[in-house]
Structure formats: structure tokens, C-alpha cells
């Protein structure tokens, strides 16, 4: 049965198994990021923050930069915004093995202020991670992640909640989960856009039948 895809009894095709990146290539890239001192953030961080999730993610969430808790633990989105993101992932019905989470910046910037110069230095790491992970969909979280991955996108409040053809594949922009925590208005916008994403995914699943 080499190459044939298993067809379950109800006639639907089983999703194609995605190849995991070569473990050695992933480990070596992650070690390189952890040891990086290419920009001034390398001197002020506690930990470089590489990745959390499956190595064959269907959906990859891309945040902006580690915050205090992420810097302490060396894991992306483990603070309050991370809890909001995990809740969203459950809301979207994405099983654990189908999701990955990373940031544009691998090190915490002082005062949590996104550092564009550092982002340029860090960019090759992000590109190499994307090359190895090859997600089906990228969900950008906040303005900086969107601008980094799709520089020609309209501002985040215009783009959020609608699928875009990004330069390296489909992108679904969202506002940042930390923004969703800031006010009721942004919390409602977050839920609205997540609902749009859930609806879009359900439509795609129906098309695949
Ligand atoms: N905000 C981000 O953009 N990334 C994190 O990892 C945590 C908070």
C-alpha cells in the first residue's frame, strides 16, 4: 500500500500525514537560537524563547516577543496572554498535535517594547523555523507579527479576522491576545475574529469531504 492514503469506511480521506522536520536540523537551529548574542537583547535576556508545540503544526501562531514570564521560563506564551491564547486554541477545536507557537523576536526586549532592529537580526531564525515547520496556516498575533510576515498587509485592525494570501502562504491575522485582555471592546473583537477563523476552518473541512 505504499503511497496510498487510507480511506476510512465512511468514504472520507484521512488527512495526509505531514513529515516532521529532520530532528537534527530542528535541534541544531534551536541550540543556535538559545546561544545567540547577535543583538543587544542577547545580553539582557534570561532565556531565548524558541518554540512550543508540535513539529508538524497545521496551524502556527506567531507572536511578537517574549514577555517577563516567557523570558523566565524560556517558553512562548506562558503568561496571561498565553492563557488567553490557549483558551482560543481550545475554542478553535485544534488538537494539541496540530498547533505550534513562536515569536518574531526570540529574546525579551526591555520594557516589552518591540525592537525592529533586533527583529531584522532575528529574521533568519524565523525564516528557518518556518522552512522546517511548513505550517498549512499562519495566524499572526498583533501588528508586529503581521507586518513582519506580510509587509504589504493593511493595518492590523483592518486585516484581523480575514484570511490573506501572504508572501509565504495563507495568513489569518488576529489582534494580540494581550490587547484582548485590555478592554471589553478588544476582548469582543478577539472573539469575533476567532469565530471568523473557526468558521473558515469548518468550511475548509467541509470542502475536503
Ligand atoms: N506576547 C508575545 O507576543 N509573545 C509571548 O511569548 C508572550 C507574550
Image (spheres, grey):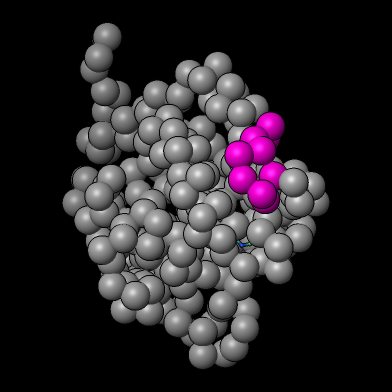
Please determine whether, in this image, residue 115 is positioned above or below residue 42.
below
Residue drawn at point x = 51 percent, y = 84 percent: 186
Highlighted range, magenta: 34-42
Residue drawn at point x = 61 percent, y = 39 percent: 38
Left/right placement of residue 196 relative to residue 167 reads: right
Q: Which of the 4 image quarters holds residue 68?
A: bottom right
Q: Position of residue 199 (x, y in %)?
A: 32, 66
> 59 or 134, which is in the foreground?
134
Residue drawn at point x = 25 percent, y = 14 percent: 3
Q: Position of residue 161 (x, y in %)?
A: 34, 72
> 102 or 99, which is in the foreground?
102
Q: Which of the 4 image quarters holds residue 146?
A: bottom left
* Quadrant where the image shows the N terminus: top left
> 15 or 169, which is in the foreground?
169
Please determine whether, in this image, residue 117 is positioned above or below residue 177.
above
Q: Is residue 38 magenta?
A: yes
Q: Is residue 26 visible?
A: yes
Q: Position of residue 40 (x, y in %)?
A: 66, 49
Which residue ends up furthest to the top in the rendered image? 2
* Quadrant where the image shows the C terminus: top left
Q: Is residue 164 magenta?
A: no
Q: Position of residue 65 (x, y in %)?
A: 60, 57
Amino acid at each position: 500500500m505504499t503511497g496510498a492514503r487510507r480511506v476510512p469506511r465512511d468514504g472520507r480521506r484521512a488527512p495526509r500525514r505531514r513529515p516532521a522536520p529532520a530532528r537534527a536540523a530542528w535541534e541544531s537551529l534551536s541550540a543556535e537560537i538559545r546561544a545567540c548574542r547577535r543583538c543587544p537583547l542577547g545580553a539582557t535576556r534570561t532565556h531565548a524563547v524558541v518554540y512550543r508545540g508540535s513539529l508538524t503544526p497545521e496551524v502556527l501562531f506567531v507572536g511578537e516577543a517574549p514577555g517577563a514570564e516567557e523570558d523566565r521560563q524560556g517558553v512562548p506564551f506562558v503568561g496571561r496572554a498565553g492563557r488567553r491564547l490557549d483558551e482560543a486554541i481550545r475554542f478553535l477545536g485544534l488538537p494539541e498535535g496540530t498547533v505550534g507557537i513562536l515569536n518574531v523576536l526570540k529574546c525579551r526586549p526591555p520594557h516589552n517594547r518591540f525592537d525592529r532592529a533586533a527583529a531584522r537580526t532575528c529574521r533568519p531564525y524565523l525564516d528557518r523555523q518556518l522552512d522546517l515547520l511548513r505550517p498549512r496556516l499562519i495566524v499572526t498575533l498583533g501588528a508586529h507579527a503581521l507586518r513582519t510576515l506580510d509587509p504589504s498587509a493593511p493595518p492590523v485592525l483592518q486585516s484581523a479576522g480575514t484570511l490573506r494570501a501572504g508572501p509565504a502562504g495563507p495568513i489569518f491575522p488576529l489582534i494580540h491576545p494581550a490587547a484582548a485582555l485590555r478592554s471589553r471592546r478588544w476582548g469582543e473583537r478577539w472573539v469575533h475574529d476567532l469565530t471568523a477563523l473557526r468558521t473558515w476552518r469548518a468550511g475548509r473541512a467541509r470542502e475536503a469531504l
